[in-house]
Amino acid sequence: MNIQGAALVGTAVLCGTISVLLAVIAIRLWDRAGIRMGGGRGAAPALEGQVEPIIFLFRGTVLIDATPPARALLDRIGGSQDDWTRLMRWIGPRFPEAPDRLAQLSRRARVEVLGREGQGSATLRLVAQDLTDGIWRLTVSDPAADHAGIVIDSMSLQAMEEELHLLRGALDQTPMLVWRLDPDDRVTWANGAYLRRAEAQGDGAIGWPLPRLLDVPRPLPGTEPVTRRAALEDRGIASWYDCHSHRMGDHIMMFALPADAAVRAERSLREFVQTLTKTFADLPIGLAIFDQGRKLQLFNPALIDLTSLPTGFLTARPSLVDFLDQLREQRMVPEPKDYRSWRQHMANLETAAATGHHVETWSLPGGQTYRVTGRPHPDGAVAFLFENITTEISVTRRFRAELLLGAQVLDGLDDALAVFAATGQLVLSNQAYRSLWGPPPASLSDAIAGWEAMSAASPGLSTLRGALTLSEGPSSSTRSSGTMTGPQGQSLGWTVIDLSGGRRMLRFWTASAQSQMPEATSPPLRALSATRTAE
């Protein structure tokens, strides 16, 4: 009985297992047959009921109705235009053929257009139907996602939406213009600043495709991002932008930064340089400005006249070394003993001019004399000034020769002469004065003290002191004379003559050599007034 019972239990378990397997296989076959016959899709309707399609109903450009996903799409697009324009902004980049195909809808009643979702691989389908009475129905779907159960983490979706909102807000609030060009140079996307500028430029709502505000050439494939400056004119006012282009696959992203301030600064700089150029053109001094790389950047016509350098050579922006070599070829530099010493001298000139104010005088082989001044400029630039001082040097030399001749004539006289300024300072004295009274004094008070120490007191000395210290009136040509005792006890005659500018000339001579004049015995002032005569 035990063996038979165990056999019955085993047989029952085996039959139950086989029944379950057959039931599962039958269900699977039934489901497959139902799917082939169009049935057996009880779960699909439930799933489709949870996913609403994107459908719009338009009468002209007015939105009549839309599904919740469709309204959410319009809200995501944003903008101040009407619903049709905003939808076309979204459809245009994804369905390039949509504008032309939608124009045929009134004749064909139904139009289907396939497009691509951005830069990805998702294929979109746009179905447009004319429902008569001017009502159009637009349906947007993703054929690849039909009946595909896609589950998205709500927290991840929320994070992506927040980041998308942040990025969209940042792009819409930025002052620069941002837009995207497709391979046909059509604007397929633009930020808020671009759309606002386009609306202001067009005096109203804008449609699709978006207008192209700035005409910037496309960068060549494989080239680095480039920057170009372009102008946007609106009612006679030009706004300047620095346009940066970046290639993204077949599309081009353009970024236009406002450059009005830079353009104004560059214009002011050009006007300032033009003003300086006109000013330098009238200067008689030759000017040559070399940049940090010692290339000639600016020169004036006087440099050509002074150096005899060819205009073509200067306009080619030669280096400082070539410039000095050409001057040497034109014999417009001092003749050196040898080329090495001359080269070292020119190197020293450049170094001194770059570190501080430096002045040299060049005596040229042709007899001219030039003053060469080197001045440092910001950013390492150097400016050289060439001035012809031949006439100045000649006048200075002639003046010095005349002064030397006058000093020699005065030293050749037997009479002792001294000239005092209005302040009492000694202006000049001759050799006879220095031989008579010793080293020349610094001032009139020192001279009087020396006379009193070296000669005996006499009325004539008192009269001389009064004549030199008494303030004169308006007359600038009076003469006073008298006699006094000299340092060796000899009789000296003196004469004081008022010169221009308050200066006074004192003359001493030996009285024995000329007619004797009686020594004054009256008080100093009375003697002075008695002996003073006007010329």
Image (spheres, grey):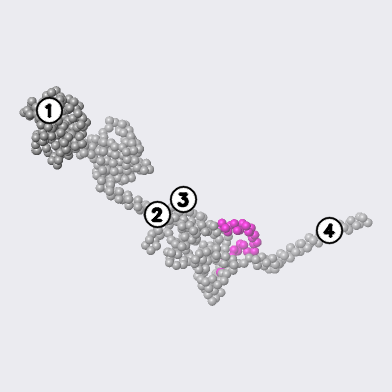
Res 143 label: none
Give SS at disc 1.
strand
Label 3 SS: loop
Q: Which residue is mark 1?
A: 484
Q: Secondary structure at mark 2?
A: helix
Which of the two discs, 2 and 3, labels the residue nearer the N terminus? Answer: 3
Which is nearer the N-term, disc 2 or disc 4? Answer: 4
Kind of residue at badge 3? Glu
Magenta segment: 138-164
Q: Which residue type does callout 4 highlight?
A: Leu
Q: Which residue is mark 3?
A: 224
Disc 2 crowd rating (10 Å Cα; few below 14, some 14-19, many 20+) is few
| For residue 423, side relative to residue 44 (left or right) | left
Mark 2 sits on what residue?
Answer: 261
Residue for badge 4: 14
Question: In the rendered structure, which amino acid carries the disc numbered 1?
Answer: Met
Q: CA distance from mark 2 to mark 4?
A: 92 Å
Q: Residues within 10 Å of mark 1 (few under 14, many from 20)?
A: many
Residue 422 place in picture, x, y as percent: 19, 37
